[in-house]
Image (cartoon, rainbow, N blue to C red):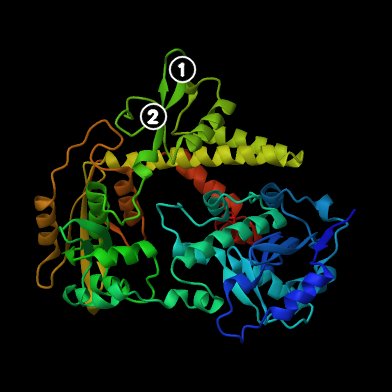
Amino acid sequence: MSHQCLTVPTMGAERESHHWQGTFDDIGRPLSQTTFVVLDLETTGSSPSVGAGITEIGAVKVRGGEIIGEFQTLINPGGPIPAFITILTGITQSMVALAPSIEEVFPAFLEFMGPHQENVLVAHNAPFDIGFLKAAAANQEYPWPKYQVLDTARLARQVLLRDEVINCKLGTLARFFRTETSPNHRALDDAKATVDVLHGLLERVGSFGVTTFDELKGFSTRITSAQRDKKHFVSAIPDAPGVYIFRGPKNEPLYVGTSRNLKGRVRTYFTASETRKRIHEMIAVADHIDTITCATIIEAQVRELRLISENRPQYNRRSKAQERATWAKVVTKPSPQFSTVRGSKLITDSVNWIGLFSGKDDASLALKAINLCLETPTDFDKNDVRSIVSKLNEKMHALALDEKFEDAAAVRNQLGSFVRGVSRGTRIRGLTRIPELVAAQSTSPNGINSWEFVCIRHGRLAGSATSTPGVDIPHTIASLIASAEVVSGGPSVLPASTYEEVEILLTYLESEAIRLVSIEGEWSSPVFGAGSARYELEKLRNRDQEAANFWVSSIQRSSR
């Protein structure tokens, strides 16, 4: 069985390429004349420092848009491949049993990558892949060549907008650029997909006038003329927490943002650190900047959310989460079953419901989990999900032991959607049913010890305040409660605000620094609900350190 595949140019083509290709000492080499070695690794874990090894290398060498070489090999990592890695990549222990070790492969791969003076290494989330290669070189006492490295994930974050792609994972970018090869957690296919993503990104930077590799390296240091000419906007911005609003010539809101320090944040829009094309366009048409100072940063964050929702500024990365949000409730006709609904108005405490979910696909996975475990949805109790979680765990592990990894992964996804969706809804309703909650945390603005207070009613921020030296704290709290917005409750899960606002408030309230001052009603969650199940699943996932490290990095790589 052959494990290694190496494709190189013909002898004539190789001689010709060396005839005209210069080194990086040649200033201004066109991108079209730069050789890129696009690579991808599959591994047994997150880092070689915790004993993880390489299981597969895939690489594609390209220049001028043409593939001039490919490299692919499975690698025996010298140890067991964890089950979750096999589920993720499909690479099993038997597949690598007769494969060469990294010690056998590394010299050939170094030769394939070529001279560091001429070639650029490219990878998606490059620090991960390059870190493993550097570790392999060190273990074999090879000096690591000083390659120039291009990270397509980082470049994508610089040139693509959030309303174009929701994130910069390889799978997302592959769909956006319609790559010929779909990434599938196999090294060569992921490398081929990254090649097409690279070419798409290079076309984008071309619109910024970037045509050489030196210009690409200096891309993030560019400042537009509008940034220079309008830098004086910053002079009137206060050093305080709050909301800033870029406005156009008709006073229309162009962009809304928030910060603990308004002047410091707004200043960054007029420096080289701001590289987003859409923001450059916004600055070019901006006429002035308004600010709203706030007593607390949480007030600023909520105001920002509401302003964006109400005004839908042209240059904000508009949240479509509210439109995508999906819930599920039990309907009785023609037979008892869960039915998905958009929006929360039909979700009340008087019906059996679960959610919220990020979309119909996410909800569908959760409902499949319920249908696998229950004969009828009327048997479902979101306050005690132990039976469902246990049955799904048993099924997933049984499938994995039987090496039915795709089926096991499907059950894992169903379990994840179920636990996340049910716990989110329960957590949200836990706060929105409370008529009034007052919380506080100690702060030290400008080195002065003080307290900030928030008043929340039915999941809506009704007011906030900061203690003032010389004014007693009980008086500050009483004034906050008296002046806070009057908010009515109701049977709906979200009677007074959006779920995004509720989740911002929950994140704030659950931080260690927060202290409860007073509460009307009860703030609780079911002992055996999905929240506790989610916590237990996380504990199991992190049972040993290597697994913990892998799952942390998989948010970045899965990604891929």
Quadrant for residue 99, please give it. Answer: bottom right
Residue named by callout 2:
341
The answer to whether residue 115 of the structure is visible from this angle is no
| Residue type at the position of mark 2 | Val
Q: Give the residue drawn at x 17%, y 37%.
A: 488
Secondary-structure class at tag 2: strand
Residue named by callout 1:
336
Mark 1 or mark 2, whichever is nearer to me: 2
Q: Nearer the viewer, residue 257 or 403?
A: 257
Compared to residue 441, the image places residue 307 above or below, namely above
Which numbered disc, 1 or 2, marks the residue that appears first in the sequence? 1
The answer to whether residue 280 of the structure is visible from this angle is yes
Residue 476 image offset from top left, x and y in percent: 12, 61
Residue 478 tag number: none
Residue 431 image offset from top left, x and y in percent: 30, 43
Quadrant for residue 473, please give it. Answer: bottom left
* Residue extending furthest toward the right: 1
* Residue extending furthest toward the bottom: 25
In the displayed structure image, the side of residue 336 where residue 249 appears, left or right: left
